[in-house]
Amino acid sequence: MDQLAIRVDQLGKQYRIGAMPTGYRTLRDALVSGLKRLGSGDFHREQETIWALRDVSFDVMQGQVLGIIGRNGAGKSTLLKLLSRVTEPTEGFAEIHGRVGSLLEVGTGFHPELTGRENIYLNGAILGMKRAEIEAKFDEIVDFAEVRKFIDTPVKRYSSGMYLRLAFAVAAHLEPEILVVDEVLAVGDAEFQQKCLGKMSDVAQEGRTVLFVSHNMSAILRLTQETIVLDKGQIVLRAPTPEAVDFYMTSNMARSGEHIWEVPPADGDAPFLPRALRIIDHQGRIADRVASTEGCTVEFEYELRRELTGLRAGIYIYSSRGESVQVRPAASGPRRGAVRCGRRSIGRSWSVHVEESRPQDLDEATPRLVPCFGRGLPAGAGGRNATG
Amino acid sequence: MAEQTVVRDAGEIPVTIIKPSRGWRAVDFGELWRYRELIYFLVWRDVKVRYKQTLLGAAWAVLKPFLSMVIFSVIFAGLAKLETDGAPPPIFYYAGLLPWVLFQDGVTKAGTSLVTGSNLITKVYFPRLSIPLASVVAGVVDFGLAFLVLIGMMVYYGVAPTAAVWTLPLFLLLALVTALGVGLWLSALNVSYRDVGYITPFLMQAWLYASPVVYSTSIFPAGLARVAIGLNPMAGVVQGFRWAILGGNPPPAGLFGLSVGVAIILLVSGVLYFRRTERTFADVV
């Protein structure tokens, strides 16, 4: 097993920015800028460029599952695109031993007009499966996706959950020597996500080489032994996963004292939509870190689409590795309207009190849940995560 | 896509080298062959999807040339009294329209194929040539359906095929080669310049009238005008098609050779341009 699977040597990818703001330009633009350059005698107009990835070198042994983490724009996806040959590097080279299956997105090439059955074949072929291979796995794929009843229905009639399940199922049954995976676990409901994660860890245990990009630290921790941390297009650390995750969480992620859900993660018809989560220090400012000796407020903003009975709210605090530090799910809401609950701490022990708020007190568009807690917050843990 | 991406078999495991590429590149036929199943599925998809959610479905494959034929018969033969070399106007126009529609559809579909397929290009690697290639080949199915109607029309008008009917596949091939050549140029240009989408309909209209679809080449005096028309491969195709079915004057061998030469130049240059620009498709599209 100690054979080289991937060798990356000083790989770099440069993108032009500014010159093509919309991604493409018209013939007229090309002609006009050409003429302008002729007129001004400036043939070497400098284009603004950015190195999405630069000077990246690493080896991966066969059978190794390597995690890649980093903030948005750190170059993770660019690296995967280069290794799966979607785009060409600007410099450096990579050597890949074995067939590469790339999963940069689920459902690549799905056609809405085709049925589930037809899309399995099409998508499978696009991902590099042979026809016989698809045929052999067909039933397995359908069962995994739980769409047997709708297999001959055009996928445009599928619910988004069914669509994603089918898309993931096809992808999950790829069997190349090297699998390159970009953030595909974020599909479906919680149950299906667990199933996906389980499937991915099966894949990892089958001795295949996997490069796995994710923002989901618990998935990274569960699936990989070693992880690369990318920042601004360069490798800043390669270490055993727990260490790499700690490093990343404390150096990058925890810099934000506010998280805003831009796209509601829940289904459109869910009655409860999270909007924002903020850590507010004792002076009332959004803070990315708070001293353990000072109080702070965790503000959780959400939207209620309709009245809920028995809404429960609480706070779970995890360490940067995803271990649970504090679990306070106790606060139960009023029967009607939204909820306002607070937490006060005395020393290290926590007390919880719940304020019932009448519906007319609430800003209807954005009712808020404002739990507060003071001393005793294990703020040194760095990463934090809260659930309302 | 990376050039000099040598895939050599070291024992059982293929080794791929990824590095920046420069200059012109030849077609990797071996790779295209390895991806033949994908090309098959892309063709299959194009055929399946083409008439989805239409009331008439695959009947459109026949109706497109048929309705054009009706219009041409009324206007050009009926009103303008254009010569149809003694053949019944409907069959004269229909026989010309069949290869023309194959060409026009192929060029149009291939021209937009990379942009429509941009979600594939930016997410998965496969030989990019397979996308426009599949678009052109998918038109052959439509052609086959429309051809059945031609046979029906021949029976109706009592037109017996000539002895030269065996040459039909050659003309068909020439139409496909030309369509692919032009389609490759347009598809690669379309990735950077969306103007292509606006230019293509006019290009096709001009090309239609530059080809002897609505008229017969016999309206031109022998000489320079006919040589000029020989520069257009589709002129050779349309003329040859009619000749193989209806008889009459065959395309002169010299001019036909010229047509073939031009078609090959279009294809080779199209492939080279495509291969040269494809390395940036995923970044630009």
Image (tube, coloured by chain):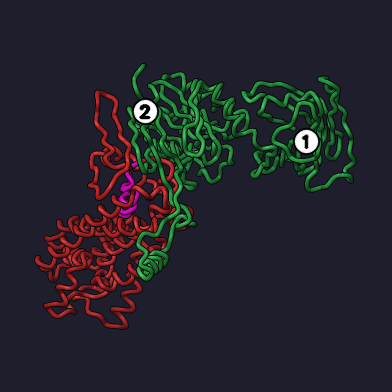
Chain coloured red in this rendering: B
Tell me which residue sits at (14%, 63%) in the image: B162
Q: Residue furthest top?
A: A1
Q: Is residue A70 left or right of residue A314?
A: left
The amino acid type, in three-letter code, at marker 2 is: Ile
What's the residue at 84%, 36% (across, down)?
A340
Residue A261 x, y percent position in the rendering: 67, 41
- Quadrant placement of the N terminus of chain A: top left
Q: Is residue A350 left or right of residue B233?
A: right
Marks 1 and 2 in Cβ contact (< 8 Å): no
The answer for which chain carries disc 2 is A
The amino acid beneath tag 1 is: Asp
- Judging depth in this view, the residue of B104 and A182 nearest the camera is A182
| Percent coordinates x, y for residue A70 in the rendering | 53, 34
In the rendered structure, does residue B128 fall within the stretch colored magenta?
yes
| Residue B27 is inside the magenta segment | no
Instruction: State which tag comes first along the sequence, 1 or 2.
Output: 2
Which residue lies at the image location 49% right of the left edge and 28% below the top edge?
A228
| Depth check, front residue: A169 or A15 | A15
Location of residue A63 by image quarter: top left
Write the residue at 19% across / 59% down: B265
Region of the chain picked out in magenta, as a range: B126-139
Residue A132 seen by the camera: yes
Label number found at residue A10: none
Q: Position of residue B127 (x, y in %)?
A: 32, 43
- A73 displayed left or right of B151: right
Report the predominant secondary structure element of the magenta stretch: helix
Q: Is disc 1 in the same subunit as disc 2?
A: yes
**SS type, badge 1:** strand
- Res A6 label: 2
Q: Disc 1 marks which residue?
A: A281
